[in-house]
Amino acid sequence: MTLFTQELIFGVVGGLGLFLFGLTLMGQGFQKIAGDKLRRFLGTTENPVLAAVTGLLLTVVLQDGAAAVALVVGLLSSGLLRLKQAVCMLLGVNLGISVTVHLIAFRIEHYPLLAVGLGFLLYSFGRKRFTRYLGYSILGFGLLFTGLDALLETMKPIAGNILVPGTISRFGRLPVLGYISGALATFVVQSSTATIGLLQVIASQSVLENGLRLPLLPAALPFLFGTNLGVCATATLASFKGNAMTRRAVLAQWIINLLPSILFLLLLKPFSHLVQDLTRGLCALGGWLGEVFFLIPAECPPQQAGLISREIAVAHTVFNLLMLLFWLPLLTPLLKMAERAFPNGRLEEDLQPDFLNEKMFDTPTIALQLATKEILRMADLALEMLHLAWTAFTQGNVAAVREVERKERAADSFQERITIYLSTLLSRSLLTAAQSQYLAGLIHVVNDVERMADHAENIAQCAEAKIDEKLPFSETAMNELDLLYNKVIAICKEAYRALADNDPAVARRVLEKEEAADKLEEEMKQNHINRLNRGRCWPASGIVYLEFIANLERVADHAVNIAQVVLKGKERGI
């Protein structure tokens, strides 16, 4: 290996590594600053335009289009987003990538090292959480451009070589080749931002060494369009273990990115002229204002090498903005087509956890919300078991008993998976004190819900004993059991609602209703003793009756435990 080749390899690998590491630091810093507000912000995405803006901001926060796409797919799979919201957010992700692309085009070669130093000082010596993570982001910003400068210096010796301009020229003659190359490069690097940044560096150096700007933009555009398709490949990978909803979103994204690209490939020259005119106009406006406008320096015209880089950035923005305007009115037919391609096909009930997603560990707020949704799903399962056990008891339905046993095994699986998920979250993520306390409360709630399921199985066994031994129950006893059963079910529903809404008022109602249920239980036990004394109750039936009451009482107690978790969380400001 010659010295030149060694320097070339080290320069490209090191420069690209610094670039990607800087992107990662920027994303982590922004995410730590905005992560706690992410959950509330996602609730504002019902409107398609707001959803697209959310996708744009999400990409800016993460500083990585592939990561933003994977996060949106994960949120959709976990049930936190609807299909229409997710597709609109994916449209916004493409625009969000343009923000970083414009940053790359904006030459700030004198400031990266200053940003590194300033970011390090803020992160190391900042006392407030916001200051430290702001420094983290600034440090990443500086490393990103330090990596770009390293790439720029490395590419200088080969920019004049026939390979680079020759390759880009071939993209102009064979747009499909450039389109596929852009998609493959993005898929391999797993970052469209890095791929476009490399394209800008190569194009700028080609202009410096060869003066190829005029034919270079139409030749670079197919590669640029292909980067969007590479992001689709990332979304496809993220949806492999997803459900029908994620597959619909991914199919919609492929259609959204593929069809307009074909049209733009046929209109390369007119589109390139539009971009060049628009870029010059923005430069002229910046010069007229005497300051930076939309990340374009006031000097007009900029140097040719800088101009091609900005033209690529403007082309990316215009392309994705036109796509957004084109697809927003067509969302309904697009989603209907995706639904026909991937119907639910849910022929039998899926009793496996559906919301747990380890990809959300980097955002603890969302990870805790997902765990809560899974616990509520487990709670619904426990309610179904109670209903089936009551049906078996009142109607003599043995099949309902078998169904309760099947669901109880699923409840055990839920408890194990949710507990492991929460324990892993605790070990992998940096949680705030409030988040740690909330997580501990959720672990207690999981155990309470699992015990509810156990008591439902016990009631089903009471029903089976009643059926097998043909035990008689008086109408009065059955009416009393029916009254207590409905009171306990109401208590459980209130407890689950308090957990879902984090509502202390509802939690306090649970405690009040449980006290009323306790009084009813005492009355029922006394009435049972009176019936026994009068000889109006079969002794074997009395044993099952008391067992039934005891299990319903324990179910209500566990509901109270859940309500107390909500109340304690509010007292601690969670």
Image (cartoon, rainbow, N blue to C red):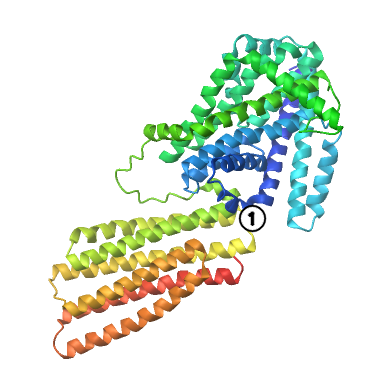
- Place of residue 258 in the rendered image (x, y in percent of width and height, measured from the top left): 52, 24
Where disc 1 sits, the SS reads loop
Residue 549 visible in the current orientation: yes
The residue carrying pointer 1 sits among few (fewer than 14), some (14 to 19) or many (20 or more) residues within 10 Å by Cα, namely some
Q: Which residue lies furthest to the bottom in this view?
A: 533
Q: Horizontally, is 337 left or right of 142 in the view?
A: left
Q: Name the residue under label 1.
A: 430
Q: Looking at the picture, how far across and down is residue 386, in whole percent?
A: 30, 65
Image quadrant where one finds the N terminus: top right
Left or right side of 467 for 91: right
Q: Please give left or right for residue 217 compared with residue 401 in the image.
A: right
| Residue 166, x across and y down, in percent | 69, 9
Query: Is any part of residue 8 visible from this angle?
Result: no
Quarter assignment of residue 17: top right
Place residue 571 in its image quadrant.
bottom right
Question: Going 55% across and 28% down the picture, which residue do you hit?
Answer: 326
Which quadrant would the C terminus be assigned to in this image? bottom right
Which residue is located at x 76 percent, y 33 percent?
294
Q: Is residue 248 above or below residue 370?
A: above
Residue 365 locus on image (x, y percent): 58, 54
Who is closer to the viewer here, 176 or 302?
302
Whether residue 252 sits left or right of residue 3 in the image: it is left
Count numbered badges in the picture: 1
Label 1 amino acid? Leu
